[in-house]
Amino acid sequence: MTPLTETEILSHLAQDPVMARIIAETEAPKIFNDYADDVYLALLESIVSQQISVKAADAIFARFRALFPDGYPHAEALLLKTTDELRSAGLSFQKIKYLQSVAEFSLTNPIDRAHLDVMTDEEIVQYLIPIKGVGRWTVEMLLMFVLNRQDVFPIDDLVIRQRAMRAYGDQTAELSGKALYKVLHQIADNWRPYRTTACRYLWRWKPTKE
């Protein structure tokens, strides 16, 4: 089956009138893949960036990589670093444990594209979440931005939920918890099989004040 062009994908999403308006109001999201399909490095970066600003995360990750002669934290080399050495980059004790967990996992479980590409999205989620510090949201970001999966709906992302609730207020008003999640999933079902693109627009969309 020939993949759809971006225009065809947007035409498909625009069958949902609300999403059509969001697309019309929003500049096309730029697609970046900073890791050139390097799942291992992307997981390390995602852990470093947890719960801190982008600017702080970039600075810490750069210092972390500078600890290694070639600028790449190969698993074996990472596991040989002392806690003090890793702390010098600005990493917390907890994040150090998480980074070590990624390294340990990668030494016994392949995480290259050839191994992951044959798996479904959910299989990849279940394969990677045993790593300490890696949850569903982290893997979903990996699916969207590194593995280029087309139909990911990261409902646990706060911005996605808030923007969807704003856009579909008549359907989500006064809902919370499981009831809200159920309705949001139903809304997103209209975007299949291109929920990733729809979410890229939701992230970039800036709703005007009424």
Image: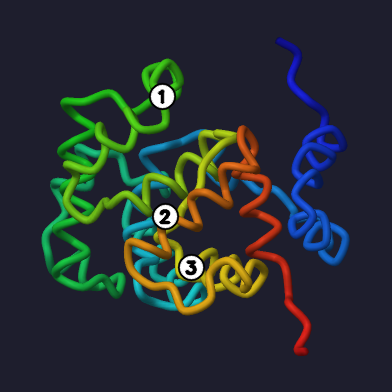
Work out how far the residue at label 3 is from the one at label 2, CA to CA, in angstroms.
36 Å
Query: Residue tagged by mark 1?
Result: 120
Q: Residue at x 39, y 20 (%)?
A: 119
Where 119 sits versus 168, above or below?
Answer: above
Labels 3, 2: front one: 2
Q: Residue at x 67, y 69 (%)?
A: 167
Q: Residue furthest top?
A: 1
Badge 1: residue crowd in 10 Å (few <14, some 14–19, many ≥20): few
Where 97 sits versus 93, above or below?
Answer: above
Q: Callout 1: helix, strand or loop? A: loop
Q: Residue at x 85, y 66 (%)?
A: 25
Q: Amino acid at mark 1?
A: Thr
Work out how far the residue at label 3 is from the one at label 1, CA to CA, in angstroms.
30 Å
Q: Earlier in the sequence, mark 3 or mark 1?
A: 3
* Image x and y of residue 210, in percent: 77, 89
Q: Is residue 79 left or right of residue 59?
A: left
Q: Amino acid at mark 3?
A: Asp
Task: Give yes or no for contact between labels 3 and 2 (Cβ–Cβ under 8 Å).
Answer: no
* Image x and y of residue 108, in percent: 16, 26
Task: Give yes or no for contact between labels 1 and 2 (Cβ–Cβ under 8 Å).
Answer: no
* Image x and y of residue 85, in percent: 19, 65
Q: Quadrant of the N terminus?
A: top right
Query: Residue tagged by mark 2?
Result: 182
Q: Earlier in the sequence, mark 3 or mark 2?
A: 3
Q: Callout 3: helix, strand or loop? A: helix
Badge 2: residue crowd in 10 Å (few <14, some 14–19, many ≥20): some
Query: Residue tagged by mark 3?
Result: 58
Q: Amino acid at mark 2?
A: Lys
